[in-house]
Image: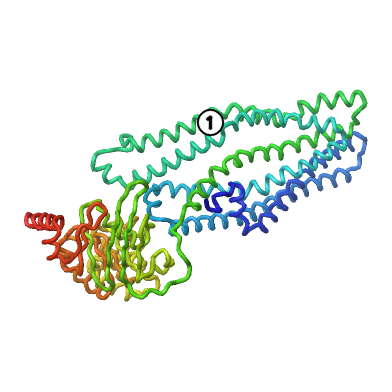
């Protein structure tokens, strides 16, 4: 188990905040000063009433104490605002750092984790869950500390006046706390269920939005789309059940806590009448008891947020603790860009996908991977790109195991174009520039021209400055794919992986794209996965994959004679073309 996995929620929260501990310390100090200043008016009122009942008629005396009360309130407001400002400044910095850590983490985990985790769930954790650590860090630490320490000092003072009345002034706390504890029964379980339902609903909403075209095409609505409806209803039901189970106890607790005079007045009168409690002390205790309960109730209310910390931080920690692709940091010297898969095995969970793959991909050549759907072609490409770890065997690059090559160095070495390339909601120019961040506009346009997409880009409303929309939604599939190819070509990596990258290319542009790709990948190590066999017949070698194994390997003409599967695939391909 990783070291981080051993951390409790509170220790992890402390780890998040440790780089800003000076600010949090200052926030606590100002919060304590603010709560303490808030008791000055109570002391002032007690002092004035005692003096008034004692016959003091000096107006200046009361004016001074009124000024002290006003000053106390002013200092309270000032200190609490300073405390809140400092704690929030630190907390928003922490939240930003946590999000950066999570985003960075996602670049280091195996791709399988991202594919198996709904994007809505990740979004909920990175946005909503991180937002919810604002209360524990910005409020609980300074305010809980102040609301406990200052009343504790007042309680000590009350004990010096009369220990009996000090106890009486606190009698509503345990009574209210009993009701509050009943409300908090199974709180963590209920809150976890509610948050899990919320994450499921968020993931379903994202899925619903992404699939809205299919939903509309098949005349589905939000109400008739059962998965969406069930997720919303489940979230609502759990939330309502939670409220129903706690509202009575909450109302009882909120009613009992402030009712401190129900004990202080009758008991105090009894002690005063039998002479065991002086009038000034009685008045002081009455006034201070009003101010004593408020901060303590505020402190108790933070237990609600404290109970949430385990779930909140647990969700964040689940991502941060996810096993990473273990890679060194020191760059390795790579002799060439030849790739070898030696007895490679791989499984998705318990489902085997590759079984003993042995394949030599020579440097500077074009190797095509073909085979039936689900045979393992794309998995081989993703293992070469180090998106996953092999379950057995090894993948080497220039004789070096890719596990011994730093992730950054490997990513700089490989340009990967998947079947369904993602475009960011940014300009066409910036989407292409993702391949090389410091590329000039001229270099971007040169890559676009070479990949055959300059012409259609210039027809867009704003040319290269046209925003592609979320996931490139404003462009057709073929246009997105050609921009992705331009992006990969701009990267100019020595290894290029095209994972069915011509899937969305229309027939009239296919020859142009193939010619452009041929020029741009000259001298590079190229791996092509294609379902159109006509696009790969000139490859230096073709590997036929079936059921996670290499069923044949060689050039096109050789495979037609030596590999029955390839022969059948070619026959099916040519027959399909003839029917067009």
| Figure disc tally | 1
Residue 524 occupies which quadrant of the picture?
A: bottom left
Residue drawn at (33%, 35%), measured in percent from left and top?
226
Residue drawn at (55%, 47%), measured in percent from left and top?
313
The residue at which mark 1 appears reads as: 243
Percent x, y of residue 278:
91, 31
Percent x, y of residue 48:
86, 39
Residue 462 occupies which quadrant of the picture?
A: bottom left
Q: Quadrant of the C terminus?
A: bottom left
Percent x, y of residue 316:
51, 49
Is residue 568 at least partly visible in the picture?
yes
Residue drawn at (22%, 62%), measured in percent from left and top?
543
Residue drawn at (19%, 60%), measured in percent from left and top?
552
Instruction: Indicate left or right for 303 with 295 as reference.
Output: left
Pick the residue in front: 292 or 334: 334
Residue 327 occupies which quadrant of the picture?
A: bottom left
Figure check: 556 above or below 92: below
């Amino acid at each position: 188990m990783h070291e981080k996995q051993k951390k409790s929620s509170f220790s992890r929260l402390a780890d998040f905040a440790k780089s800003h501990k000076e600010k949090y310390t200052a926030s606590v100090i100002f919060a304590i000063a603010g709560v303490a200043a808030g008791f000055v008016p109570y002391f002032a009122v007690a002092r004035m009433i005692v003096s008034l009942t004692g016959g003091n008629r000096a107006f200046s005396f009361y004016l001074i104490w009124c000024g002290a009360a006003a000053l106390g309130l002013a200092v309270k407001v000032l200190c609490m605002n300073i405390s809140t400002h400092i704690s929030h400044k630190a907390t928003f910095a922490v939240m930003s750092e946590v999000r950066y850590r999570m985003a960075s983490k996602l670049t280091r985990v195996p791709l399988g984790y991202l594919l198996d985790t709904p994007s809505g769930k990740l979004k909920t954790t990175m946005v909503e869950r991180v937002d919810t650590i604002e209360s524990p860090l910005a409020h609980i630490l300074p305010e809980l500390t102040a609301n406990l320490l200052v009343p504790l000092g007042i309680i000590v003072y009350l004990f010096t006046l009369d220990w009996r009345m000090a106890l009486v002034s606190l009698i509503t706390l345990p009574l209210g706390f009993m009701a509050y504890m009943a409300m908090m029964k199974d709180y963590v379980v209920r809150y976890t269920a509610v948050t899990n339902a919320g994450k499921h609903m968020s993931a379903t909403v994202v899925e619903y939005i992404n699939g809205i075209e299919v939903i509309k095409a098949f005349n589905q609505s939000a109400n008739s789309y059962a998965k969406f409806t069930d997720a919303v209803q489940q979230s609502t039901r759990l939330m309502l059940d939670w409220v129903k189970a706690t509202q009575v106890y909450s109302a009882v607790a909120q009613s009992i806590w402030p009712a401190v005079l129900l004990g202080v007045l009758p008991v105090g009168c009894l002690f005063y009448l039998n002479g065991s409690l002086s009038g000034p002390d009685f008045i002081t205790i009455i006034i201070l008891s009003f101010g004593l309960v408020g901060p303590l109730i505020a402190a108790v209310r933070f237990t609600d947020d404290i109970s949430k910390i385990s779930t909140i931080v647990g969700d964040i920690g689940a991502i941060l603790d996810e096993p990473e692709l273990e890679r060194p940091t020191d760059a390795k010297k790579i002799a060439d860009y030849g790739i070898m898969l030696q007895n490679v095995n791989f499984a998705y969970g318990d489902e085997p996908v590759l079984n003993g793959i042995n394949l030599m991909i020579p440097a500077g050549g074009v190797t095509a991977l073909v085979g039936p759907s689900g045979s393992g072609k794309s998995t081989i490409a993703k293992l070469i790109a180090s998106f996953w770890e092999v379950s057995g065997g090894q993948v080497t690059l220039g004789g070096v195991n890719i596990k011994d090559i730093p992730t950054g160095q490997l990513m700089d070495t490989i340009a990967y174009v998947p079947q369904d390339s993602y475009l960011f909601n940014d300009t066409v120019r910036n989407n292409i520039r993702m391949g090389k961040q410091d590329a000039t506009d001229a270099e971007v346009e040169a890559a676009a021209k070479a990949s055959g997409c300059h012409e259609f880009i210039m027809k867009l409303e704003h040319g290269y400055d046209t925003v592609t929309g979320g996931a490139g939604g404003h462009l057709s599939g073929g246009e997105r794919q050609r921009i992705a190819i331009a992006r990969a070509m701009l990267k100019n990596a020595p290894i290029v992986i095209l994972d069915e990258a011509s899937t969305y290319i229309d027939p009239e542009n296919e020859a142009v794209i193939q010619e452009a790709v041929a020029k741009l990948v000259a001298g590079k190590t190229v791996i092509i996965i294609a379902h159109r066999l006509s696009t790969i017949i000139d490859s230096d070698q073709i590997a036929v994959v079936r059921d996670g194994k290499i069923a044949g390997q060689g050039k096109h003409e050789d495979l037609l004679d030596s590999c029955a599967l390839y022969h059948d695939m070619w026959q099916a391909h040519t027959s399909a073309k003839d029917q067009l």
